[in-house]
Structure formats: C-alpha cells, structure tokens
Amino acid sequence: MPISDSVKLKGKVTIFHPTLVNLYGCEVGDGSRIGAFVEIQKGAFIGERCKISSHTFVCEGVTIEDECFIGHGVMFTNDRFPRATNPDGSPQSDADWTLEYTTVKRQVSIGSGATIVCGITIGEGALIAAGATVTKDVPPYAVVAGCPAKVVGDVRTMSAAKKSQSVNQVAEEVVG
Ligand SMILES: CC(C)(COP(=O)(O)OP(=O)(O)OC[C@H]1O[C@@H](n2cnc3c(N)ncnc32)[C@H](O)[C@@H]1OP(=O)(O)O)[C@@H](O)C(=O)NCCC(=O)NCCS
C-alpha cells in the first residue's frame, strides 16, 4: 500500500510502517504519528502532534485538529445514505452521493472501535469511549459512550468522580 505523491506530510511525521498504510491526497501535520494499516483519503486533514492508531480509516471530508488521539480501528464515514448503485443498477459515481463533513476539534481522544457517523463536530477535549457509535455533535470535554453514544461524563471532572462513582452513575447525574 502506498503513500501517494499527493500526500502533504508537514514537518516530521512518523509513519511506523510506510509500506503498510494507504495515504492519498491528504495532509498530515508536524509531529503526528500514524500506525500500520491506516487509510487516510483525499481531502482529509490531520493536525499536528496527533496519534492515529493502527487499522483506522479517515475518509474524505474529515478534519482532525491538533493533538488528537485516534484509537485502533476507528471508522469515520462521509456518506449518510450509502448505496453501491443507482436505482437503474448503474454503479454510483462521485456525482451520485453527498459528502458530509466531520470535524474533530483539538485534543479529542477517540477510543478503539468507535464509529463516527458523518456531519458532526466532536468538541475540544472530548473523550469517545471504545466501541461508541457517535451520531450527533459532542460537546467540548464530554465523555460519550454507547450506541448511539450519549454523554456519560466530563473529562474535566472524571478523575475526581471516578474516586467514588462509576461512569454510568455520572451519566445518571448528567443525563438525568
Ligand atoms: C470510557 C472510558 C474512559 C471509561 O473508563 P472508566 O471511567 O475507567 O470506566 P469504568 O471501567 O469505571 O466503567 C464504568 C461503567 O461504564 C461502562 N463502560 C466503560 N467503558 C465503556 C464503553 N467503552 N462503552 C460502554 N460502556 C462502558 C462500564 O461497563 C461500567 O458500567 P457499570 O457502571 O454499569 O458497571 C473507557 O472505558 C474507554 O472506553 N476508554 C477508551 C479505551 C481505548 O479505546 N483506548 C485506545 C486504545 S489503547
């Protein structure tokens, strides 16, 4: 798998296994690190000092700002209603679907196996639990979990909260 000539790697980007990634038409910022079996499509932007863990898919239309952690096997999407073909059976082309953009603000962490449904913004510093399916905007510093993902806490108070109660107890307080 290649790193296409169309990729803009800014400054010092670390790609641990350059022969085992598929990068084309994307931009990756200084100090970012990219694991094996990652695909980053054209029109995707990765900021500075991010970590993109192995087996993750970052599609066209996704912007990941600086200092984000993206876990293993995280799946971004950009077509809300995907179809292989048009009603007449002809293969769909770029003209036959609508790209929806997704923004991941700075210092977000996304746990392994999360799926990010397109057209949303994940707020600064938020934490997405492993395996979550995120379908709506995530407020800054929120912890979200589950399918569909719900707010279960706040990263700014999580450490203190964890001393005496679980994420789900925090969730009951936050969600009501
Ligand atoms: C969300 C997360 C930060 C919560 O951690 P935590 O505060 O230690 O949570 P706890 O283990 O105390 O679990 C609290 C409750 O939340 C539930 N929970 C924990 N993680 C969950 C998840 N990913 N999805 C749904 N529920 C989860 C637990 O089952 C538990 O439920 P209970 O109260 O009914 O028993 C953590 O579980 C997580 O998903 N981290 C991301 C890990 C990851 O993917 N790392 C990247 C690659 S190494």
Image: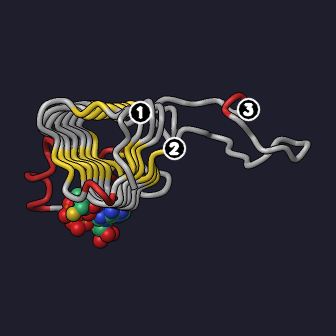
Q: Position of residue 152 (x, y in %)?
A: 32, 50
Q: Secondary structure at mark 1?
A: loop
Q: Earlier in the sequence, mark 1 or mark 3?
A: 1
Q: Nearer the viewer, mark 2 or mark 3?
A: 3
Write the residue at 19% across / 30% down: 10
Q: On screen, 96 above or below 115?
A: above
Residue placed under numbered mark 1 in the picture = 25
- Looking at the picture, tell me which residue is in the foreground, 7 or 121: 7
Q: Tell me: 84 left or right of 140.
A: right
Amino acid residing under circle 2: Thr
> Split into 4 quadrants, where in the image is the N terminus?
bottom left
Mark 2 and ligand 1: say if the CB distance to the nearest ligand atom is below 8 Å. no
- Residue 155, located in which quarter of the rendered image? top left
Amino acid residing under circle 1: Gly
Q: Secondary structure at mark 3?
A: helix
Write the residue at 26% across / 54% down: 18
Write the residue at 17% across / 37% down: 67
Residue placed under numbered mark 3 in the picture = 96
- Looking at the picture, tell me which residue is in the foreground, 46 or 137: 46
- Looking at the picture, tell me which residue is in the foreground, 168 or 61: 61
Q: Position of residue 46 (x, y in %)?
A: 29, 35
Real-space CA distance between mark 1 and mark 3, rounded to the nearest whole angstrom: 21 Å
Q: Residues within 10 Å of mark 3 (few under 14, many from 20)?
A: few
Q: Nearer the viewer, mark 1 or mark 3?
A: 1
Residue placed under numbered mark 2 in the picture = 77
Q: Earlier in the sequence, mark 1 or mark 2?
A: 1
Real-space CA distance between mark 1 and mark 2, rounded to the nearest whole angstrom: 17 Å
Q: Position of residue 29 (x, y in %)?
A: 21, 32
Q: On screen, 136 above or below 70?
A: above
